[in-house]
Amino acid sequence: MTPLVAVVSSPRARLFACFLRLGAQQADPLQLHTGAGLAAKSHYEVLVLGGGSGGITMASRMKRRVGAENVAIIEPSERHFYQPIWTLVGAGAKQLSSSGRPTASVIPSGVEWIKARVVELNPDKSCVHTYSGKEISYKYLIIALGIQLDYEKIKGLPEGFAHPKIGSNYSFKTVEKTWKALQDFKEGNAIFTFPNTPIKCAGAPQKIMYLSEAYFRKTGKRSKANIIFNTSLGVIFGVKKYADALQKIIKERNLTVNYKQNLIEVRADKQEAVFENLDKPGETQVVSYEMLHVTPPMSPPDVLKRSPVADAAGWVDLDKETLQHKRYPNVFGIGDCTNLPTSKTAAAVAAQSGILDRTISLIMKNEKPMKKYDGYTSCPLVTGYNRVILAEFDYSSQPLETFPFDQSKERLSMYLMKADLMPFLYWNMMLRGYWGGPAFLRKLFHLGMS
């Protein structure tokens, strides 16, 4: 399926995009190997649970701290995905194949990859158990298990994805169905949803709406499309500066936003979606659709929900500044599985990784952690095939911007960064433990302006 080519307005921008794409193609993937051929040990100085962005990044950093032979990652999946690009895959601007690589290729060289699923955490005895019954002990534990997609909590899913006209950018199994539904759209309602749970990349449910609207305009279908964003939230975005900019776009592009509307059922055979009014529990509305993009409910992984390391809601219970566990001093966490009160994004993981690296290194020396995480996170709000509003903010939902210009404005440069530069940084720097977010750039720009 041929991806839709983004429209770029100037020769200089096209040259920049080509340069980035060429760099991404020519740069070798992580030419690293696992220690899988060695006899797996039963004890490690640092044990990492999860081989996603947080787990691989921290394994790379810990390898430099204690040596590869003293680090292990427990991860069952054979493929590792750069999930932020799936927004563009769902809109036909990127290929799904560009988002994934074999897990073996991103495990740091010499670090043991234990290809298994963790079924129990026992922090009181500093050990975990895998599905096969193996017990693995540790001196330090890093929990990076990500977030769980709960499609089954919506009646009619996931089996409804077998029908046309419905997709979801949150799974590699369903993201291409979004692009197919977009291409096959004829006339009617195009509905985009946001669930009544915490989710990862909270901007993604509306990014695909803006991209779909742009696609309808490009293909002459806009007048036949009634575009609806049904969100369980009470606001379009949690940071006022960016919310104001998005509200302007919503008005200009004649998009309908309905707040406090939670998707509870999909009748895919009838092309109907059922929403509950959260302000009036029990009150439901059935809406027909020509296209439906589903953002699933999400939750902590089941293994964490029943673990002593979890808070009452099931998330890893961390000190929000040091990322050290509140009750178990040799346990740490990173990313989507934690209760850190910030948006769950890959950008947040990058920033957290630098802080956590410093925290653990000081704990290993019996010193007190000094560096504090400020909640930095970022959401590149894609508003078209060549425009992005780069939202960056902290724990207090205040803008924490990197560049010396107003990031609430749609910009081509920010789109190129999202589409081409960030994937390159992810595969070649972040996963190798060399990218801790843009804090140094922010200081550099601000110093230059002072």
Image: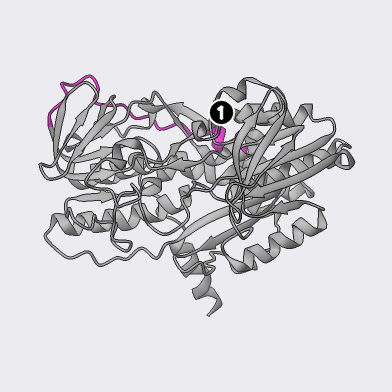
Q: Is residue 173 above or below residue 264?
A: above
Does the magenta portion include 102?
no
Percent from the top left, x then y, of residue 261? 63, 49
Percent from the top left, x then y, of residue 424? 52, 41
Drawn side of residue 233 relative to residue 365, left or right: right
Q: Is residue 202 above or below residue 3?
A: below
The residue closer to the viewer here, 166 or 269, is 269
Which residues, given as a range, are shown in magenta? 21-42
* Residue in the picture at 37% in, 57% down: 340
Count up the numbered dots. Answer: 1
Res 385 seen here: no
Q: Which residue is mark 1?
A: 157
The type of residue carrying mark 1 is Leu
Res 9 seen here: yes
Quick one: quadrant of the N terminus? top right
* Residue in the picture at 72% in, 25% down: 270
Percent from the top left, x then y, of residue 144? 33, 42
- Furthest residue to the bottom? 450
